[in-house]
Amino acid sequence: MERSLRTNTTNRQNLRIRKDWLEMMVLLSPGLLLLFVFVVLPTVEAFALSFQREGLLGRNRVFVGLENYIEIFKSKENLQSAWQSLYFAIIVAPLEIVLAFAAALLIARPFPGVAVYRTLFFLTTAVPTGVAAIAWSWFLNPQTGWANWLLERFGLPAKTWLQDSSTALPTLAVITAWAGVGFASILLTAGLQQIPEDLYEAARIDGANGWQQFCSITIPLISPTLFLVTLLVFLRSLTAFGQIHLLTQGGPADSSMVWIYRIYQDAFFNFRQTYAAAQSVLLFLFLLLLALLQFRLVGRKVHYE
Amino acid sequence: MKKRYLAFGLAAALGAVSLTTAQSGRTTVTFWYALGGSIGEQIEGLVKTYNASQEKITIKAEYTGNYDDTLNKLRAGLQAGKGFPNVVQVYDVGTRFMVDSEAVIPLEDVAKKNGFDINKFVTQPRNYYTVDGKMYSLPFNSSNPLLYFNSKALAESNVEQRPLYTLVQLEDTIKRLTIKDASGKTTRYGITWNADSWFVEQFGYNSGYAYCNNENGRKTRATETTFNNPAAIAFLDMMGRLAKDGYAAPVGRDGTASLNTFVNGQAAMYVSSTANLFGATRAVGGKFPIRTSFYPFLKERNGVAVGGASLWMLKGFPQIEQDGAWDFIKWMVEPSTQARWHLGTGYFPVIQGVTDRLDVKQGQVKNNNFVTAIRQLQTSKSNSTSAGCLMGQFTEIRTYVVSAWEEVLKGKPAKQALEEAKVKSDAALTRYNATVAK
Amino acid sequence: MNKTLARVFFYVGISVFAALLVLPLLTLFSVSFRADADVYNPSFFPPHPTIEPYQIALEKYPLLRFLLNSFVISSLVTAGVLLISSCTGYALARISSRVTNTVFALIVGLLLVPGEVTFLPLYIMVNRLGWVDSYFALTLPFIASPIGIFLLRQFFKSLPQELFDAARLDGAGHFRMLWHIAIPLAMPALGALAALTFLGTWNMYLWPLVVTNAESLRTAQIALRFISSDEAVRYNIVGAAAVIILLPTLIAFLIAQRAFVRGIAMGSLKG
């Protein structure tokens, strides 16, 4: 009697485990299949292609070992592109963070009318890259743009922003930073709002003024978030594409031929897909390195909390 | 419930557009074209007329972006083995690639089979599109570069317009047409000239220099570029001087910015294809009359090559579609079509017997700038130099030449910039030739 | 007194800052209401405001069709992401086994793969499948989103075990628990993920640029590029088209600002 009860329970448990297993497969497999096909396979294929050379229209692919990579490292242009991407990100990240942090500080705590300002500061989140590029190209129009009009009011010489190889990349960086301000200020505002209000109250009771509060509470507590957002912005700006495609196409004189744009150019314009694949792999490894860094830092941050 | 209606509505809306209405007995032929703006409207108009003119064939015309985009998309389709059109418009410099792709049907063969006489084409466009002794594609829109003048500015600055300009004469004219204020700031530029490789190519041809070796790649396959010739060097050095001293508008490589500058009266001269004649005239409106002159040259005039594009027919479709494609291409180069096209754009007619038509003559009286391009073509010498360079990877090579131009604007000597571009270009060409070697 | 002055300064300062930030957008609005003759007049307001550029833009270009394409693609991707992320996330969170743990670690690894880098091999694959110029190419590759799976897995993991134990006793299987317990509780998280995904898809540029040729499949972003090169001389029309293309996201953002803000904060920081 006792034994049969136990067998019954085990049977039922076995049945449930089998049913669990089945349900899990049903729930898991579509997602995993899609991830495999659209994320894993292309990544593997990029590696495979990068060791090949191909004929016209992708015919006659042959294995050539590291030839593509050797060519990349030998070519001045590719190294220049890598540098341009870094240079671009080095301008974008601090600029965007300064603007967004200023905005976040202003709107993190409620005051009458804060909703309006929040909307205005977050607004660029809703502006698609293409629209941003169009707006700026008109704003910066050398002959009639408001930017030059303002410069001239202040007695400064008009500039040809995007048509001049010495200003094109920094100008694109400003546009990119502008377009990201909404995104970054949302993150920083959220970060600021997580700082407990009573810390400030305690400081006020101790007689700390605003600046002291800022230095001793806000900065230390927001700095992990600040650092993280900076890294995020940095990563994002390394793959900025739309604005460059719309505004300068890598020019003038290759001055805005950033890494990702060169890959596009080589793959879809010069038809060197395997060579472009090798460049993709390098960019991938580089971004992976940065992402791993980010991941470790996030891990540490979580750990501290 | 509401949501379901919405979803249904969306599906219906999409279906309505993407489902081709099944018209009984009509063959659908896809045609990719690469011209937007007012020129694109003209193409749409032609296709509409063609579709209405007969009952057998429906041309499905798709604007696939500019010339570069269109060629890129075609290559992607060819590589995939599907998703390419029956007929495609490919620009002049894509010719070598198209032949090498082995994906096209030589139209000279089709023409012969259908009793169409290819001798009816005007000599230069015919020469341009003859590759290895055969016409692979039929020219449709052929153009050459012109100097555009704002005649009000000419009068204001008391400058005579010449029919022909050497480089020295041109530079002098540009300087005289420039207006600067007391502080030395330019208030009206002498010229607006966007950095486009085509202008370098044409200046070389017009001065008697080939762009690539083996007689512009016409005798045998080109293996090396020759754009670092005295004409191109003198030309780019002039562009550098004009930019530095504020005589040329700082428009960079942007052709439309250049047109804007001219249209708004901020520059007295403008350089562009004859194809922009109609668009420019419309954009200028009544602000000032436009005058045109032949493209300049270094010392002695040889003649310009034809630019623009031709129509290609692709392999891999059923015979009934191929027949439809041929019928359409043939219609596109008919004198009556070409007359309308010429007057609506400024492209010159590629086939004989158009200029004698009454409507064309009347149109030309109304806007006699249309005649400049045709006269420039008729008076060009016919040789391998003016036939234009035929080589692979031309699109990539053009980007190097544009970069060289931009380097010159930054202050680099033209000789050095062009030689650097030549190294990159020759590497690209060698690479290309290796991929098609048999 | 001093306090009032400080307040005035604060409002003036913050307003100037906000105005400078939206200035480039105002340029766009300003040019879009101009007649052809006023396009190159540098005044702040259009001297003779007109809606003609909007009429021309709508007449010449199937802008609504482009927006509909963007909308359909973004909706499909969003729906797919919500579905796949819920299922996969649930399985990874509630069913504990060595398999799910390994899979989860792998997905965390995929989080590190920057999407922009795989566009070339993905394109080669899509092209081989003959999917260029199809809604497949524009949607399918994106509906399994590592970030979405990760977020929902974390969320489902945080739900109290007792809820599920109770359901278990009632004889509920995983499907029922997912549908009746997990998803209703995850609504705010799903809403935020939806906002994030929708916006991200709507703003895609590089991918639709390389996988679409046909006008009937063109998204609003890519259409802008065609319009801006076609109409460069009539910038008022380009401006009007850009404003029309901006409007849907702008309106959605104004209405659902909260979901957007939460989505962005959650999707980017909680990692």
Image: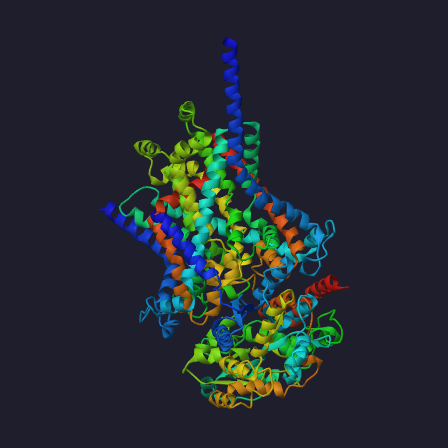
**View extreme (top): residue:** A1
Above or below A171: residue A36: above
- Measuring from the top left, give residue C190's x and y in whole percent: 41, 40
Above or below A297: residue B295: below
- Measuring from the top left, give residue B373's x and y in whole percent: 57, 84
Residue B323: name its quadrant.
bottom right
Instruction: Decide which of B372, C57 is in the foreground and name it.
Output: C57
**View extreme (left): residue:** C1
Instruction: Decide which of B429, B319 is in the foreground and name it.
Output: B319
Instruction: Decide which of A52, A235 is in the foreground and name it.
Output: A52
Residue B96 visible in image: yes
Above or below A276: residue B236: below
Q: Quadrant of the C terminus of chain B?
A: bottom right
B257 relative to B72 in the view: left or right: left
C90 relative to A37 in the view: left or right: left
Instruction: Decide which of B412, A61 is in the foreground and name it.
Output: A61
